[in-house]
Amino acid sequence: MKKILTIPAYIWAVACFLLVPVTFIKNDAFAEQLAKLPFMKIHPKYNGGELNRNYEKDGLSVRINRPVYAALFGEGNKGFVQVTFSAPAQLPEQINQTIDYNFDNNPDFQVTINTLNGETNLIPLDQTVKSVYASSKVKEDWVIRVNIEKK
Amino acid sequence: MTKPVYATEGSIWKSILLTLPMILLILIFIAGGTPDLSTPEKSVAFLITFLFLTLLFFMILYTGKTDRYRAWGFVTMALFFALTFIVNLIKARGSMTFSQENLLACEIPFCHIVTTMIIIPIAITNAIIFPGSIIGGFASIASMLVIVIGVSLALGRGFCSWGCFYGGWDDGTSRILRKPKIKKINPVFRWISFAVLLIIALISAMTLNPAYCDWLCPFKTVTEFEKVTSFTILMKTVVFFSLFIGLVIILPVLTGKRIQCATFCPMGALLAFTNKINPFDVRIDKENCSNCEKCVNACPTLSLNTEDVAAGRPSITCMKCGKCVDSCSKRAIHYHIKGTPVNKNFSWARNLFLYPAFLLLVVFLGGPMQNGIILLINLIKTGSLIN
């Protein structure tokens, strides 16, 4: 009986011996399949969240994402909203925009960005807006994340 | 009783014969089957890498010593990986630091250790808490997860001694002193990594932030780290750099043990569980064992103590490096395939383990070693690693 049991043990070992080269040779194919699984997406805390609205203003394309109130369960009270500015050719030296991130027809904050040195000034116009969390050129665009709090 | 020997031990022809399949695998994995010999630098780099890997595998078979030659490849891998990674970063970004732009663009390479921090958030939020790319680009999340799953199924925690491109650092420093200054270490320390895993996994889930990467990972010192733009980032830098000095250099030198891997790596703790679901382990033939405890003293990861020897197997934390196997003058401890007799066919078990394990070394060392040699040739020719 013990001798018979050694056969599947050796088959298992040989299968594992083959698994290592297969893992690397077929890595791209396996990775593509894995990437299709529903949980294989970057958390909004890192990718900035889903696009909410996109409009043109002062020669700039403004993309406002959905606010992200990241929490392990449900939503937290504190979060951020990501806004992306892009231009058809080159970003202007100065970006000065008023943003209504929740689309209630009341401006929420005014932001001024010096795209040469990255200096970013935020003027909160709504009590939910707190501070600048991130402001940086990303490829050809300028991305800001503004800290917000639920009312 | 005479010491049992491996089938290839001391036999040149048998060793060459069993090296031949590995030569083919080395050719496939370091050159894609067709080596790039378009420049003298590339030709030299390919030839040195090919000969180095082939010689290591041959010596493992011929001498019957596993860890002695594994360690040469493993430490070389860590050094060349760090060299090529840093030079590539400097070429691409101008420094070893990553910026807010890289974070916002989700361009951070995913390393296997992050796996420990994303599991709970995936289960609850259905998303990955890491600023990397899911697929495509260098070290994408999907690609690295496939490697982690495939290798852990095949070798369990053997990854930590044959594939981890960080492990070679403290493996190397732990060998600097022939006789360690601190000889007795309580084996209870081997369980600390499980506590680290639990705490890191929980904190990462609660904060939705890969806490170990952000604050603790010592290997950021030899790869990439956040640009210091605030006091908090400065504190993080001090913490991970101090941990590198302490856990990867000073303590391994003083103890002769892989302290970072054995006590502080959450990935090692996670991979320890996969030791239960793969066919290879290390076993002690109690009939041959003289209880000299050379293996206990040799184990670099505190995976063997007196009780483990009496039980005939190392603890779940074993990294299958082979140091205990090399240390045994009776050859009472050896690689084993679960479900087979402990004291029979250990040459078969060793060879069946060695092929996939060494192949892992080939895969992770082949590219960095060739690129590293090219960089070093350029350094000699031009005086610069970057140009």
Image (cartoon, coloured by chain):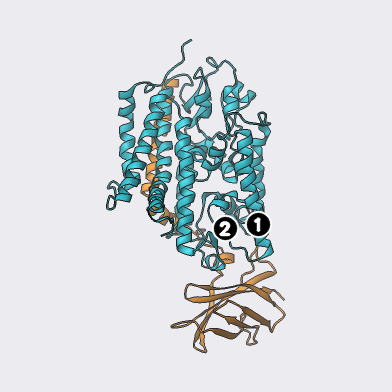
Chain colours: A orange, B cyan
Which subunit holds the residue at mark 1?
B
In the image, are marks 1 and 2 on the same chain? Answer: yes
Q: Residue furthest bottom?
A: A58
Q: Residue at x 29, y 50 (%)?
A: B40
Dividing the picture into quadrants, the one containing residue B195 is top right
Name the foreground residue: B349 vs B360. Answer: B360
Mark 2 element type? strand
**Vertically, is B42 above or below A10?**
below
**Vertically, is B343 above or below A48?**
above
Is A12 situated left or right of B281 in this image? left
Dividing the picture into quadrants, the one containing residue B246 is top right
Mark 1 element type? helix
Residue to which mark 2 is pinned: B225
The amino acid beneath tag 2 is Phe
Could you tell me if residue B129 is visible in this image? Answer: no
Q: Residue at x 61, y 78 (%)?
A: A119
Q: Percent position (x, y) of residue A30?
A: 40, 52
Which subunit holds the residue at mark 2?
B
Q: Which mark is residue B365?
A: none
Residue to which mark 1 is pinned: B236
